[in-house]
Image: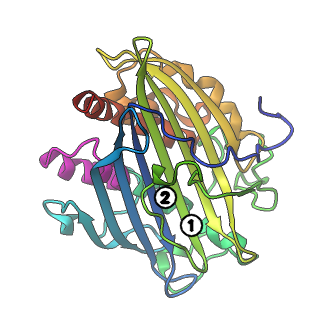
Amino acid sequence: MADPDHAPNSSAGPAPVRRANSVRRTSTIDSSWPEGRGGPMTMSGRARDVVTGPDIAACSAVATGAFDIVATMGREIRAIETTPRLPDPARLIGVRGGGQSRTSIAAQLGAMDAIGTPLHLLLDDFAGASLVAGWAWSRWTDAWAEPAGADDSARRTFPRMEGICAGFRPGATSLDEDGRPRHDIQSSARVVSLVNPADPDGWHPLAEQVGVGMRRARWIDIWKDAGLVRIEAGFQDSSTAPHGGRDAVHEYRVSATADPKGMVLRSVQADPRVLPYRECPAAAANINRLVGAPLKDFRNEVLDQLPGTLGCTHLNDVLRALADVPRLALMLESHS
């Protein structure tokens, strides 16, 4: 249970060992700044779906996706390459991370019947990953929250955040008197590798990050049990650190069940493991509002049911990705 007086800062550790007769999707988006703070951000996304049979040693990758993006500090796409290739990637040049990028990306993926694929998850996650990536600099410089470089889109003060999520609800300790986020009290936690030593094949290959780097990592497992589709998911935003290892600012674990016929959510629980402010975990108490909703609609349903202070930006990111469960369930069925 979350401590109302302190931000959660206890990582759950590596991803669990895969279960027999399951499907696992893993994804990472690694961000770095080859030209230094203030320069363009390079983002490398990789994702993979693996089907595991009765013996976890016998697993096979059945789908993959990847992107390489160069973005401005203002989160506008300057260059993009994807695998599989988008029908018209040039249309994304100049698109800014957020609702604009998600709409533009969904249009192209829909045209190639790629909704719910590893590439869809990665590209949909560009918005959130690009938003949080700059936190990596907090590990390396005290001036990380100040504008840097010649990119005019970065030359702005932090906007008022009051009311946008549970962590920034009115009166929260996370806000200063002007309603802007306080960086001096942010919590974080040291974290170990997400690759479980007992299950080294449980992740796609993870690149080594040298210097200042941010990683958004996800895993989602599904399997069938007692007439239900069982779902477990993990989410972590972590950075390299000058002293070695990694520090995380966000980490959640989510457990859920769904009806295998209608793929409707039957139950859901969220476990906040690492978050920056003590108010952040309050959002987890509201997620039962989603029970009864079709998983395929979750990319929009989560935003509709958990707006503003009812939700957490990063918990919402975890939950929105459950929209991919129906496609993963078909994969499980076809390989059983």
Is the residue under label 1 in contact with that under label 2 (CB below 8 Å)? Answer: yes
Residue pushed farthest top? Answer: 227
Quadrant of the image containing the C terminus: top left
Between discs 2 and 1, the one toward the N terminus? 2
Magenta part mainly helix, strand or loop?
helix
- Name the residue rendered at 36%, 45% in the picture: 59
Residue 102: x and y in percent read 33, 50
Label 2 is placed on what type of residue?
Ala
Q: How many marks?
A: 2
Q: Give the labeled residue for mark 1.
A: 214
Residue 253: x and y in percent read 60, 37
Label 1 is placed on what type of residue?
Met
Residue 21: x and y in percent read 38, 31
**Marks 2/1: CA–CA distance:** 9 Å
| Res 313 seen here | no
Mark 2, Cα crowd under 10 Å, few <14 / some 14-19 / many 20+, is many
Q: Give the labeled residue for mark 2.
A: 129
Closer-to-camera residue (232/306):
232
Q: Is residue 19 left or right of residue 335?
A: right
Closer-to-camera residue (93/209):
209
- Vertical order, 255 against 178 (above or below): above
- Vertical order, 89 against 220 (above or below): below
Q: Is residue 312 left or right of residue 78?
A: right
Q: Which residues are magenta?
A: 101-123
Was residue 102 drawn as part of the magenta stretch in this picture? yes
